[in-house]
Image: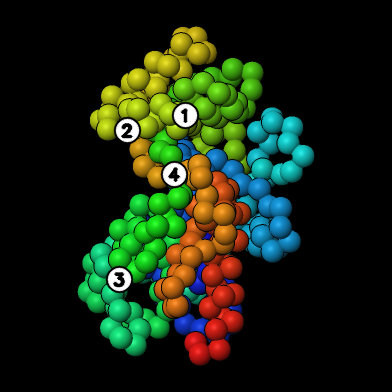
Amino acid sequence: MAGVACARTLADAGLVPMVIDKGRSPGGRMSTRRTDGFTFDHGAQYFTARSDAFRAVVEDALDAGAVAVWDDGSGADEPHYIGLPSMSAPVKHMANGLDIRCGSEVRAVRSDGTGWVLEHDGGSLGADVVILTAPVPQTKNLLGAHGFADPLDQVHMAPCWALMLGFEASVDPGWTARRTDSDLAWIARNGTKPGRAGESWVVHASPAWSAAHLELDKPEAADRLFAMLQTDLGPLPAPSYIAAHRWRYAMVTTPLGRSFLNKGTLYAGGDWALGPRVECAFESGQAIANAVLNESDI
């Protein structure tokens, strides 16, 4: 979200940004897995829109059919939005027409005296401005030598183990989603979301449990989380699909406290700059783009 929001703002102003993404498609933690007739939003569960700028983006995506409202039973005063048909849909809608190179990881960023050179899986690339919106540990690895290490040391991100369960028949505990303070921080019937398939459940372990068990093998993590779920809810049918996904850098717990960092024409930002919300990623990316546009020599 941060990278595409930034690139969209720059492109709309007449610049020519290129987005390099090591993932298979844009979206990052706004991610959806489809398998065996089930749909799992195993990263971000929903998002809200509080600022005028982000609300305009969401309303445009709503009109385009890339966003829907999910009634998760929380009774929240603000709508809980999801991407349609997948969580990454609003990012892809914003990215329409942008030059995005997926499946390529940036390995190094270095100065050539007048600009920047990026070493990535596809070779080398020169740029006048470099904007990095990766999670903090990866940003620090790439930009630490350029003076970013000290401020990034103040930012902390927590991991999350996600459990995905698919049941052949309906399993209705009497609620749609539940947030708790236990080791299972979030439980949701993902199949109740618009555009999702099957009796699909997504469970997120707490940051503390995830950190303590971060290096479990995925099958063992899935078995442990399912056992914990049955301890919490009582016996459940044997799932026809069960898998776990490890998010090493899932959620910022101590943000930077400002929209971005920069050293001249080298910028870094993301949700970790402002807070653990999709909208925070958007705001950071847009703030970087506006700062770039305000530089008269670019």
Above or below, 64 relative to 175: below
Q: Amino acid at mark 2?
A: Leu
Disc 3 target residue: 109
Disc 2 target residue: 214
Q: Amino acid at mark 3?
A: Val
Disc 1 target residue: 206
Q: Residue at x 77, y 39 (%)?
A: 77
Disc 4 target residue: 157
Labels 2 and 4 touching (C-beta < 8 A): no
* Nearer-N-terminus badge (3/4): 3
* Separation (CA) of disc 1 from disc 4: 13 Å
- Can residue 66 be seen here? The reply is yes
* Separation (CA) of disc 3 from disc 4: 23 Å
* Separation (CA) of disc 2 from disc 4: 13 Å
Residue 119 image point, x, y percent: 25, 71
Q: Residues within 10 Å of mark 4 (few under 14, many from 20)?
A: some
Foreground residue among 46 and 208: 208
Observer-side mark, 1 or 4, equals 4
* Nearer-N-terminus badge (3/1): 3
In the image, 128: left or right of 278?
left
Q: Amino acid at mark 4?
A: Met
